[in-house]
Each structure stands twice: as structure tokens, then as C-alpha cells.
Image (spheres, rainbow, N blue to C red):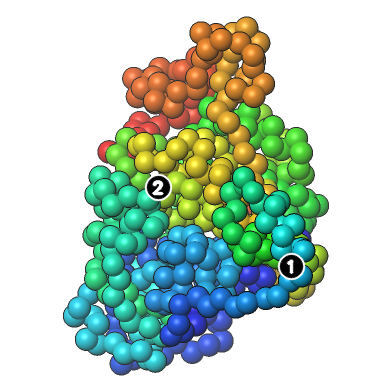
Amino acid sequence: MQKPHGGKLINRCIQKKEPIDTKGLPKIEIKKESAEDIENIANGVFSPLQGFLCNNDLNSVLKEKRLQDDTPWTIPIILDVDKQEKKQIKEGETAILTNQETGIIAKIDIEDIYTFDKKNLAEAVYGTTDINHPGVFNVYQMRDILIGGKILLIKTQPTEFDKYNLTPKETRILFKEKGWREIVAFQTRNPPHLGHEYVQKTALTFVDGIFINPIIGKKKPGDFKDEVILAAYETLIKHYYLRERAVMSILRTSMKYAGPREAIHHAIMRKNFGCTHFIIGRDHAGVGNYYGPYDAHNIFSEFPDLGIVPIFFRSFFRCKKCNGIVNEKTCPHDTKYHINFSGKKIRELLRNGKIPPEDMMRKEVAETILKFEKPFVE
Amino acid sequence: MKKETDDKKYTTISIPTPLAEKIKKRIEGTGFTSLSSYVTYVLREVLSGIEEEEREEAFSKEDEEKVKERLRALGYLD
């Protein structure tokens, strides 16, 4: 079985037998995204993290793309508080993390309270300080003080997609039961078109099973709704995959749009789910023109010790001459014969209630999407 | 998660001079900017390989049964 990142699958969920005494403890109000981080720490998705980063780990992540102990780690998992909240807390003490919607979520043993340079963080993680970058924008929106320390999850946030919500422990047992030794993970935030299917099936040819792992969380207007993505994949798997070779479950986290650094982070999370391989396409986790199309491939050469095998794919397209799906490594023909799988075009057709051509998207998948009255985030 | 006071520390390791010369030649024209960065890369790779060979602790039988029950209820297992 694949080893978790850092060697051990972290479990920071409260055991039923443990008494929960939160009386008198200071409370810190956290955002939904931080609550998702807490669950991912607690369930081992972010192994080896046991809590939010302290200052020295954060500095090491920004400068070295590694934790202080040399474990590869590229995205800061940090918790911000405001000045008022800071007055109530002290290093060495425990605080309660709450959210307006769900109430008490977790406890944190505060090891470090510190300030951070937002510009420096943005530059290191996103390679830009441009406020138009959505990740940078979020950094500038953060409160000024960070706290670090181990957490203990008290209450899980409810999700409407519980059926698809598996923890790393569950996926690991599932893969073992299925007899899969080598598993390739596919990260997605869109319904599948034929280009995606081709990439997935090409990778699947070389391993025992595929783990389709859509990211569910905060989205931009115009994006497909989470339930639409899941329904579209259900349909694709039902009609075009061997049931014993494909598994889908969700990952509840927000996209950071950090391009190459986020590609490493995505690979680490899938390693913790028990996957041995991870598919990286063109401009993985990119946004706008902030990253080169294959920056997210190149960064992997910095991590010989990542412990998960990246499978790099160039963009696939349809070639009229080849009469099939190809890419620049496999097709010798002129670009005039090429038809790209344009997500934008597919979206436009679906928005107008039209089924995209069958050489772009499976009819069954398109019909599933069109069953939704409003498939897009407004 | 441990809070420490110093930034990342580096240490010096001795290797035979002829080996160092050989490595210097090998890394010419590659992405490695120094002997140290190459040696760090190789050691990380070697250590990671050794660690992967070590077996991970299995889940307890009771834990595993509970999980399998949920997986069956959700339709992931028959």
C-alpha cells in the first residue's frame, strides 16, 4: 500500500470516548475554507500536517517548498485571526475554532502567534503580487495575524455530497479490497469531455484503477455547479468505464490557482488517499496567463522524494487526418486538421441548451448536464 | 508543526575530492547550480526509495470492518 506523505496517516479527529470540555476557552471565528482545511488535516488528507503552520514552517514552505523537517510541502496551510481575537489568546493555551453556520468545529493548541508579509507570501506561492490573481486577492483579504498549532476536529461540517465523501483511510481500504496496487488519480473541476476521458483511459491502461477526485468547494460565477460535475461523471462512469476499475469521490477544498506549487499539493493529497500516480495536464491549477503551460510539469523535477509518480500529458485534440484523438507528440499533421476540446465552446453550447457535438462530449454526459435547470454558478 | 527559533540549517559533509570533481563534471549544463544541490537531490531520492520499501502499519481489523460496512452501504463495495 502507498505510504502516506511523511510516513504516517494523520488522524486528528476526536474519539467518542474523549470528553469535550470547551467551557471558558476563547473562541475564534473561522471561514468555511479554514473549516475545510481542519477536516483535511484531521482526516489525513494533509498528512503529515497535524495543525496550522507555525512561523518557521511557513517560512520554510515559502523559501524551500518544504516543511522544516525537509518534507515536500508547497501550499501554506495557515489560520488567520484579527487583532481583537489575538487579545484573547496566548501561546501555550487552547482555543476553540467556530463557524457561524456549524458552531464549534475544533480545538487548537496554540504554539505560535505571528504576523506575516502578505506580499512576500503572494510572490512566493503565486509568483505574482497582482491583486487580479484570485489567489493573491484572497491573501490580501486575510486578517493580519496567524496562529499555528495542532488541531483536534470536534464536529464535521455537513455536506450534501456525503455519498461521495471518502477519507484517505476509507479510500485506502477500498483500494485494498479492490485488489488495486497501482492507482492513478485524476483531479478535476469540470464535467468530462472526450479529451479528459482520453487522458484518464490512457493513464488507466498502465495501472490497476483510476481515482476520479473532483474538487468541491468555492467556485467562480460561470463555473459548473458541484452537483452537475458529479452527475456528469456518474453518467460517464456508468456508460463508459468498467465499474471495477474506476472510483469517484470528492475532495472538499478550495482551488488556490497557484499553478505549479498547487500541482505538487494536489499530488500530495492524492498520495495520502493511497494513489501511486497522478495526472498532470496542461496549465494544471493555472488561471489567466500567470503560469507557463507546462510549469506544473517542470516543478516535479525539484522533488525526487515526493513519493507519487506524476504522469504528464500534453493537450489532446482531435485530428481529422489521424481520425482520432492525438497530441503534439503523436500527431504529425498540420494544425489546420486539429480540433481542440474547447471547454469554453462546450460551456457556451450547454448554456444555450444545446448538446455539444459527439466528438467533443459524450451525448449521455451532455444530456445529464442539461437535465439541470441551472447548471452554472450564478 | 514544531515551533523552532532558527531558519533551516545546513551542515557540511565530506566526500572524496575525486568524487566531487566527477559530480561537478556531471552537473555541467544541467539545472543543478552546485555540488550541494546535486548531492541533496540524490540523497533525497535514495532515502525516499528506502522509506517506500518499508511497510506501512495496517489498520486494525475492527476499523477496517467498520469502513468496509460504510463502503458497502455507499455502493463502493459489493
Residue A109 lies in quadrant = bottom left
Residue on which disc 2 sits: A257
Name which residue lies at 51% across and 8% down.
A336
Amino acid carrying label 1: it is: Thr
Q: Report if residue A374 is visible in the image.
A: yes
Q: Secondary structure at mark 2?
A: loop
As measured in the structure, the alpha-carbon distance from the residue carrying label 2 to the one carrying label 1 is 45 Å
Which chain contains the residue that carries disc 2? A
Amino acid type at image mark 2:
Tyr
Graded by Cα atoms within 10 Å as few (under 14), some (14 to 19) or many (20 or more), the crowding at tag 1 reads: few
The x, y position of residue A139, in whole percent, is: 29, 59
Residue A287 position, x and y percent, is 38, 40
Q: Can you name the residue that lies furthest to the left here?
A: A84
Left or right of A70: which side holds A100?
left
Q: Residue tagged by mark 1?
A: B17
| Residue A124, numbered label | none
Q: Nearer the viewer, mark 2 or mark 1?
A: 1
